[in-house]
Image (cartoon, rainbow, N blue to C red):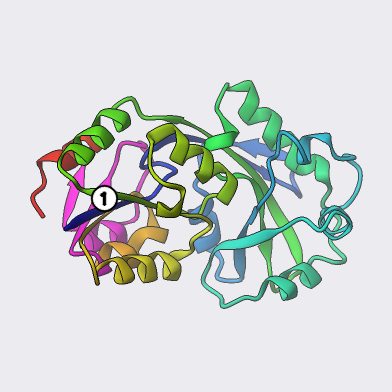
Amino acid sequence: MKAVVFDNSGTLIKRYRAIKDVEKGIICDDVSSIDVVDFDTSRALVVLQTDPTKCINRARPDQTLYHFLKKNDINFDISYSAMDLKKEDLLQTIKDDNSRVRDIQDTFNAVVDKKYNVQICSGSGFIVNITSGKVEFTITAGGKLFKEVLPVIEELKKRSIHIFVASGDREGSLEELAKFIGIPQKNVFGTADSKRKKEIVKELKKKYRVMMVGNSANDILALEEADVGVLTLQQGEKVPQKVYEAADFVINNIKEIIDIEF
């Protein structure tokens, strides 16, 4: 039996990401959150496990992020970091940080203004510097399904290939994605960091011959672990050389995986 494991953002969906430099008050959309974290090994990318349209966007903007997370018992996960961190330690780290809910709301509004769907992407989060205890950047990401995805999914189903998604995105957004592409909820693994993606692929290899399809540095371990690793460049962002080196195939459009034998 065969299985294909997809990353989500940048692989199945065209991602639009707004990142706010909290200190400078500047919002940009031309940098990768993974690259920002990689630039400083003290940083961690945190994904909030809440629907930003129903929670974050309705919250009082002047409260600190720490107060907002603590008071409302907001669940979150560490999506990407070079450090081995525990969630409870991270929350304590930002106790004295002055970043506000409005800093996330600013990025949410920037994504909505571009008419990208935050329901099928990672939603909102932030990048914290563990050493300084500062939230340096806030983030919201939205997406649009690449038009080739649904035909590719249907073709894989016709070939009796099992389909999975392993992504660092918010769990709720991936549940919505599963509905969009018509796969079982149990086949979706949310807020999976690099190590978790590798573990998922390794576990699936006990039953399937596995192809992993991803697009960035947090997919490297899974690409290397899979029987066949595929790097897709359809997102159109610059990809570090180390990701190319981890992949067996490099494609420019998701439909090209149909022609790869594995």
The quadrant of the image that shows the N terminus is bottom left
* Residue 74: image location, x then y, percent: 77, 55
Q: Dot 1: few (<14), some (14–19), or many (≥20) neighbours within 10 Å?
A: some
* Residue 22: image location, x then y, percent: 74, 48
In this rendering, is residue 242 above or below 4?
below
The quadrant of the image that shows the C terminus is bottom left
Closer-to-camera residue (162/32) = 162
- Relative to residue 227, is residue 225 drawn left or right? right
Q: Quadrant of residue 19?
A: top right
> Residue at the spot x=66%, y=52% of the render?
49
Task: Examine the structure image and report whether residue 108 is included in the region drawn in magenta.
Answer: no
* Residue 11: image location, x then y, percent: 36, 42
* Residue 217: image location, x then y, percent: 39, 59
Indicate the secondary structure of the residue bearing disc 1. strand
> Residue at the spot x=56%, y=75% of the render?
83
Closer-to-camera residue (235/56) = 56
Which residues fall within the magenta stretch?
Answer: 225-252
- Relative to residue 190, is residue 207 drawn left or right? left
In this rendering, is residue 224 above or below 113?
below
Task: Examine the structure image and report whether residue 229 is included in the region drawn in magenta.
Answer: yes
Q: Which residue is mark 1?
A: 162
